[in-house]
Amino acid sequence: MNTKRPAAVLFDMDGLLLDTEVTLKRIWQREAALLGFDLDDARYAHLVGVPNVLCEQKLAQWFKDFPLDEFRRNWKAAREEERRTAAIPPKEGALEMVLWLEGQGVPMALATSSSREAVERNREAWPEIFRFAAVVTVEQVERPKPDPDIYHRAGACLGVRAADCVVFEDSNPGMRAAIASGARAIMVPDLAVPEDDVRRGAAAMYPSLSRALLMREEWF
């Protein structure tokens, strides 16, 4: 493996730095069930790493007469209630990874399929993790993941090429975006099982950011 020091490290957010994916899955499955629709694990797997607006479109395609407006109101209200009652925890090793890279003087950026509003809310909860020189959100690109635009833009914000960066991702669409950008794409799976093309294109895979940090000689 090429172990040249990366020009920068680019991170996804949901399911990689913060344990948001498990909470969102529970909410979406529960709210769909309350409306009489079975959003099972097999279907939900296709939503991981995809912007929420596109996920909602998929539901409308999968289920006849799906009450999308009602579902959207309900899941957003349920998510806000979760946020009021319990802070979403960071993923294992997230803080340690960010602090180590900062100590090494490596520029870092966030490139997420979530909204700017979601990023700011998470930054308020975990300022010690959100120590990024640049943040690129889904509103800033015409083509979201799995298109590589968001990683090209994140690199450009730092004055480097995506191809000279390391990217950490947890989902298949995110990994496809990172691989297509030319970056060294490293997967830390959360809810998603790595698909064959992602396995072939990944520079490495680790069960947690803690493990990735322990094995940093392989990618740094």
Image (cartoon, grey):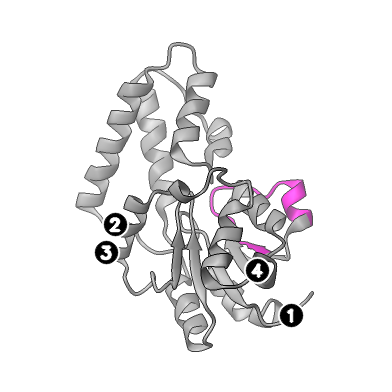
Question: Label 4 sits on what residue type?
Answer: Arg
For marks 1 and 3 on the same chain, the one whose residue lies earlier in the sequence = 1
For marks 2 and 1 on the same chain, the one whose residue lies earlier in the sequence = 1
Question: Label 1 sits on what residue type?
Answer: Thr
Question: Label 2 sits on what residue type?
Answer: Arg
Q: CA distance from mark 3 to mark 4?
A: 29 Å
Q: Is residue 105 above or below residue 76?
A: below
**Residue 189 drawn at (x, y percent):** 59, 56
For marks 2 and 4 on the same chain, the one whose residue lies earlier in the sequence = 2
Label drawn at residue 161:
4
For marks 3 and 4 on the same chain, the one whose residue lies earlier in the sequence = 3
Label drawn at residue 3:
1
Q: Are marks 2 and 3 in contact (CB under 8 Å)?
A: yes
Question: Is residue 216 among the parts visible in the rendering?
Answer: yes
Residue under circle 2?
121
**Residue 39 drawn at (x, y percent):** 48, 27
Q: Are marks 3 and 4 in contact (CB under 8 Å)?
A: no
First to last magenta residue range: 185-200
